């Protein structure tokens, strides 16, 4: 009767139960520590920047049937771009993926965050060339699973938009 809340908690539980392949959350200290470092950073940075942008640019206007506040969106755009730059410089640096040569849970969390503003028209790659290359590698590595989820997410966004009178 275990009931867990939060994607990180659930993922770590699945990992401890050995349900998740090793590369997602390596048992060796360096890889796991780098992922944990990213997850701590992500909660205060990309999660907030991407989530706030998504809320103010798309969700709140949909729910309130009003246009987004241009000044607020501009400030959030600057914040988002700074976060993407920091992600690129600190976590991607010279790596193929967040922790090195193999995809990990950190890459999965990052692409999910970045997709929120991307799916509503923000171009996360405009000033971030390393980010664009990383994004393509992650999508390729995730293969049809990524494509299926992306299509479903986009369909839900478009369905919500159509319900607005």
Image (cartoon, rainbow, N blue to C red):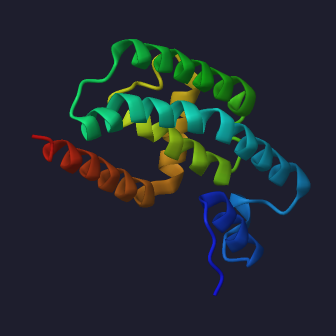
- The quadrant in which residue 67 appears is top left
Residue 120 at least partly seen: no
Q: Nearer the viewer, residue 157 or 126?
A: 157
Q: Answer with left or right where residue 82 lies relative to residue 13.
A: left
Percent x, y for residue 23?
71, 60
Looking at the image, the residue that sits furthest to the bottom is 1
Looking at the image, the residue that sits furthest to the right is 29
Q: Nearer the viewer, residue 128 or 73?
A: 73
Looking at the image, the residue that sits furthest to the front is 64
Query: Which residue is painted at 90% across and 55% down in the image?
Result: 29
Percent x, y for residue 68?
31, 23
Q: Is residue 16 above or below residue 139?
A: below
Q: Answer with left or right where residue 86 lies relative to residue 64.
A: right
Percent x, y for residue 100?
74, 43
Query: Which residue is painted at 60% across and 18% down in the image?
Result: 82
Quarter containing the C terminus: top left
Q: Answer with left or right where residue 102 lies relative to residue 160.
A: right
Quarter containing the N terminus: bottom right
Tally of numbered tags: 0
Query: Which residue is painted at 38% across and 57% down in the image?
Result: 149
Query: Which residue is painted at 35% across and 58% down in the image?
Result: 148
Percent x, y for residue 97?
66, 41
Looking at the image, the residue that sits furthest to the left is 165
Q: Nearer the viewer, residue 71 or 15?
A: 71
Residue 43 at least partly seen: yes
- The quadrant in which residue 129 appears is top right
């Amino acid at each position: 009767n275990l009931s867990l809340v939060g994607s990180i908690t659930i993922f770590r539980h699945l990992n401890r139960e050995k349900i998740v392949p090793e590369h997602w959350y390596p048992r060796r200290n360096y890889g796991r520590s780098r992922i944990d470092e990213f997850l701590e950073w992500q909660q205060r940075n990309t999660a907030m920047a991407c989530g706030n942008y998504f809320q103010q640019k798309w969700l709140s206007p949909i729910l309130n049937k009003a246009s987004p506040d241009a000044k607020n969106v501009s400030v959030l755009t600057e914040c988002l771009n700074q976060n993407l730059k920091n992600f690129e410089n600190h976590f991607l640096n010279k790596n193929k993926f967040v922790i090195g040569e193999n995809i990990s849970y950190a890459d999965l969390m990052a692409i999910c965050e970045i997709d929120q503003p991307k799916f509503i028209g923000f171009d996360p790659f405009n000033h971030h060339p390393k980010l664009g290359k990383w994004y393509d590698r992650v999508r390729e590595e995730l293969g049809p699973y990524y494509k299926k989820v992306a299509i479903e997410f986009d369909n839900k966004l478009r369905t919500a938009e159509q319900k607005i009178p």
